[in-house]
Image (cartoon, rainbow, N blue to C red):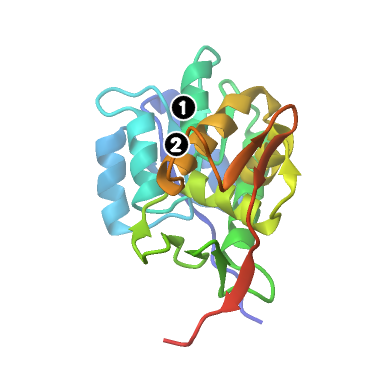
């Protein structure tokens, strides 16, 4: 039985006094860690090798972590955990809206970070290889979502770009059609963490999906608001096996 390859991390933080000891600790935990002191060096590192997960500081000189996070998620489809200072609540919310998978607040316990890394990677693995219907398309109201390619097509066949966070939110609705999902449950399914303080992140992601999927986002037909309850996908959903290419 072959051994699993080690998990590769990219640690991006301009504080060498934090970055280097943390990289050493994570290496002792069995991870392969590559370091970058800023966004420019991180982008260069990504050309050479694709990590399994990125640990990303928000506040950095030059390009900040939020801008780099958007690139990592939308262009690279990589899981991201933010490393944030206590006073950056607004930035944490924006990061979650962009699609970051989790965050830890400095100073943090390294063992907690390791647990969060493993949790995010487990969740990511479940999303990319769901059991029995891994290659089945979602079809609803003329729309189609390919969960493997993360490709959303409208009823005319036009591909609609969506972020990783929007993809996870849409999958939550498609897996529970016509069910009312409150914000806490959506956050648990989408973020996989006790993030009830960030209800606004769900509201904003729903608004973004509506702008992309509804004829009139102010009077939504597909993703409906249930006052006092949350949101509901008002559509029947079929899973259809894909034809071999």
Residue 6: horizontal and vertical position, in percent?
54, 61
Q: Is residue 70 left or right of residue 79?
A: left
Residue 156: horizontal and vertical position, in percent?
37, 64
Q: Quadrant of the N terminus?
A: bottom right
In terms of secondary structure, where does tag 2 sit? helix
User: What's the CA distance linking mark 2 and mark 1?
Assistant: 6 Å
Q: Nearer the viewer, residue 101 or 142?
A: 142
Q: Is residue 160 left or right of residue 81?
A: left
Residue 137: horizontal and vertical position, in percent?
55, 71
Residue 101 seen from this side: yes
Q: For mark 1, what is the residue? A: 94
Whether 108 is drawn above or below 147: the answer is above
Q: For mark 2, what is the residue? A: 98
Whether 230 is drawn above or below 234: the answer is above
Residue at the image position 54 percent from the left and 67 percent from the top: 5
Residue 236 lies in quadrant: bottom right
Residue at the image position 44 percent from the left and 35 percent from the top: 56
Please say if the residues under marks 2 and 1 sit with CB atoms less than 8 Å apart: yes
Q: Nearer the viewer, residue 176 or 149?
A: 176
């Amino acid at each position: 039985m072959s051994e699993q390859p080690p998990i590769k991390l990219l640690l991006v933080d301009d504080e060498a006094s934090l970055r280097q000891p943390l990289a050493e600790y994570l290496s002792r935990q069995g991870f392969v860690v590559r370091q970058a002191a800023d966004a420019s060096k991180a982008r260069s590192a990504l050309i050479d090798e694709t990590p399994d997960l990125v640990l990303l500081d928000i506040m950095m000189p030059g390009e900040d972590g939020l801008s780099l996070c958007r690139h990592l998620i939308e262009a690279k489809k990589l899981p991201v955990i933010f490393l944030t200072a206590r006073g950056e609540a607004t930035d944490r919310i924006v990061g979650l809206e962009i699609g970051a998978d989790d965050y830890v607040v400095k100073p943090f316990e390294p063992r907690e970070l390791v647990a969060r890394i493993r949790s995010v990677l487990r969740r990511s693995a479940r999303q990319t290889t769901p059991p029995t219907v891994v290659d089945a398309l979602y079809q609803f109201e003329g729309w189609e979502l390919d969960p493997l390619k993360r490709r959303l097509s409208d009823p005319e066949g036009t591909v609609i770009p969506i972020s990783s966070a929007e993809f996870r939110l849409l999958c939550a609705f498609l897996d529970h059609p016509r069910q009312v999902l409150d914000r806490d449950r959506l956050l648990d399914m989408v973020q996989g963490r006790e993030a009830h303080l960030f209800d606004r992140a769900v509201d904003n992601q729903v608004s973004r999906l509506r702008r992309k999927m509804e004829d009139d986002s102010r009077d939504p037909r597909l993703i409906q608001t249930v006052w006092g309850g949350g949101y509901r996908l008002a559509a029947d959903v079929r899973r259809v096996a894909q034809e071999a290419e």
